[in-house]
Amino acid sequence: MKENNNIRMQLQCPMPKLDFDVITLGHGSGGVLTNKLLDSGVFDLLSNDILNKRHDGAFLELNGKTAFSTDSFLVSPIFFPGGNIGELAVNGTVNDLAMCGATPKYLSLSFIIEEGLPVKEFWDILVAIKYACEKAGVQIVTGDTKVVEKGKGDKIFVNTSGLGPIHPKANISAKNIAVGDKIIISGNIASHGMAIMSVREGLEFDSEIQSDTTNLNHTVIKLIDEFGGDIHLLTDPTRGGVATVLKEIAQSSEIGIDLFQKDLPIDDQVASACELLGLDPLYVANEGLFIAFVSEASADAVLERLRQDEKGKNARIIGSVVGDHPKQVIMESGIGGKRVISMLPGEQLPRIC
Amino acid sequence: MKENNNIRMQLQCPMPKLDFDVITLGHGSGGVLTNKLLDSGVFDLLSNDILNKRHDGAFLELNGKTAFSTDSFLVSPIFFPGGNIGELAVNGTVNDLAMCGATPKYLSLSFIIEEGLPVKEFWDILVAIKYACEKAGVQIVTGDTKVVEKGKGDKIFVNTSGLGPIHPKANISAKNIAVGDKIIISGNIASHGMAIMSVREGLEFDSEIQSDTTNLNHTVIKLIDEFGGDIHLLTDPTRGGVATVLKEIAQSSEIGIDLFQKDLPIDDQVASACELLGLDPLYVANEGLFIAFVSEASADAVLERLRQDEKGKNARIIGSVVGDHPKQVIMESGIGGKRVISMLPGEQLPRIC
């Protein structure tokens, strides 16, 4: 489905005719070639009143509590089943803002391109950025394009930083976590990491494992709008996966977390791929998933509402906050055994996002 | 003087004792090693109430007109006479915000580190970032650290994005430029680019050519506070130099610009280095310089005030906006000849910022 989307997007935004096929150092000079590249379609594609001013920075009107986040993306390969580095970069920052209880509104976009990148690939990434922005309801308002010599980068790195007003009912803070809180996950784990790994390792399954990269902002804002302060903390388990993110929270907030292995939602094929490669899905990166710490009283209602949303249809309660074993995450296996969960010790899957 | 500053800074912020000497892929995993790196001193060094929350994004209070800007820095070498990539990254975004008439306030900081970077170099860059932030009066409020394999990056790339409230008296827009406007440059041109080139080419002079990297925000805000709407446009001539930036403005605003070569301020040594390497200083990058388009009536007063500021002591009026030859920049040489100025055609000095 996502693949078809990509093809449709490309048809609607055909690449302009250019007199160069690859990006060269000159396209990062700030001079004629940079202008040629940007004028050739980049500004048209991402056009909006703020960006079109083309000043050193964007002029915005912001009022009140605002979230601000940044991420650099250097996923390899830059095209993978279910997406590419462009939409990943938009969704990543959009979701970081959503995790603050904010409605993402404005993004900056900065490219570090390795000399020799085919313009066609750059264009496909830009088109994916455009559509990801539309889906999330954000605008690219300022940007930067730099080029490094061949062998001093890897095709393309993308930084996005973002801004958005915090929802008036949001009160997201690790300080709000209380004993009894339920931990809800919005969907199946480990899809993004295993989509990347399957390509790298040349694994073939009955059907392709697709990255879960998507924007979560509309889903999250709906929950905040209905449940407000009952949602204590939101976080997206990207690098390091569910295990690392929960351990970090347990440690910094000095709370105990109990986790139930049998409740962790995972696609069968993703589970098989993990087994085949000897990877623990708890540590595999996700890009379209969030974890919510919710007050005990509201947890079932939040879960029910979340499951009505396409992006939360596989949501589950996977654990709870407990008074004993502060700073520890303990996972109970299906057969009753218990295991202490630590953070990802080293690097499991480099260049995953 | 700058060198001494660096030594003093390092003495005041000694590197913490660590059990690793170089950055490895694991430091970008988002797991134990990333936390170890960040906890080892990064958070302490850059500490402030907002950053210390360590959430997916920063929670800010912003009200009214705000400027937002982004830049990725990939200068090579990362340490150069007069600075390093750390302060360059802070000053670059600080100055882009100042060029919008804004008081820079909050920055994001994102690293793409090549595996193998000595921790000592990373620390020196962080210390430079800390001091550059203090000088500019900005806070790092959110960040990201990623690591790429050896040979897939080049030591370290730094992205900063920034935010700041626009001064109530500022009215910066290319639309305000009018025939008769004077064009003021705040100091000597071509120093940053020639500092980098001197190192790369192994040139030796009586005294070292130093980069002009510095924060311009306090200087600019003082001018806006006094002269308000008489300052029509501000821009910093970084990549592509003075020529490219003026040509871009002439073209997009459909104005004519007359430039007087004899009035272009340049240090003798920088001029010699340019001659030696066959480079036109008009196209060489600057990092601590701005150009202001000022109403004719206020130009002399603005210049006088600017020259009282340490960062504007070499300021000059270098040209004016004219009614004829729209979209063209014409430079009159010392002996009366005229030359049409175009944008930097290709790449003169790659990886300058």
Image: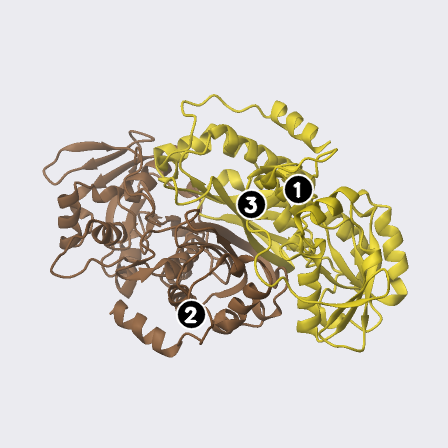
Chain colours: A yellow, B brown
Amino acid type, callout 2:
Glu
Asked if badge 2 and badge 3 are on a common chain, one would say no
Comparing B304 with B296, the one in front is B304
- For mark 3, name the chain: A
Q: Is residue B34 visible?
A: yes
Q: CA distance from mark 2 to mark 3?
A: 34 Å
Question: What crowding class fits label 2: few (fewer than 14 Cα within 10 Å), some (14-19), or many (20 or more)?
Answer: few
Q: Residue at x 27, y 65 (%)?
A: B310
Residue B22: % across, % down? 42, 63
Q: Secondary structure at mark 1?
A: helix
Comparing A126 with A73, the one in front is A73
Mark 2 or 3: the one toward you? 3
Q: CA distance from mark 1 to mark 2?
A: 43 Å
Say if A212 sits above or below B162 in the image. Answer: above
Mark number for residue B134?
2
Q: CA distance from mark 3 to mark 1?
A: 12 Å
Amino acid type, callout 3:
Val
Mark number for residue A75?
3
Mark 3 or 1: the one toward you? 1
Amino acid type, callout 1:
Ala
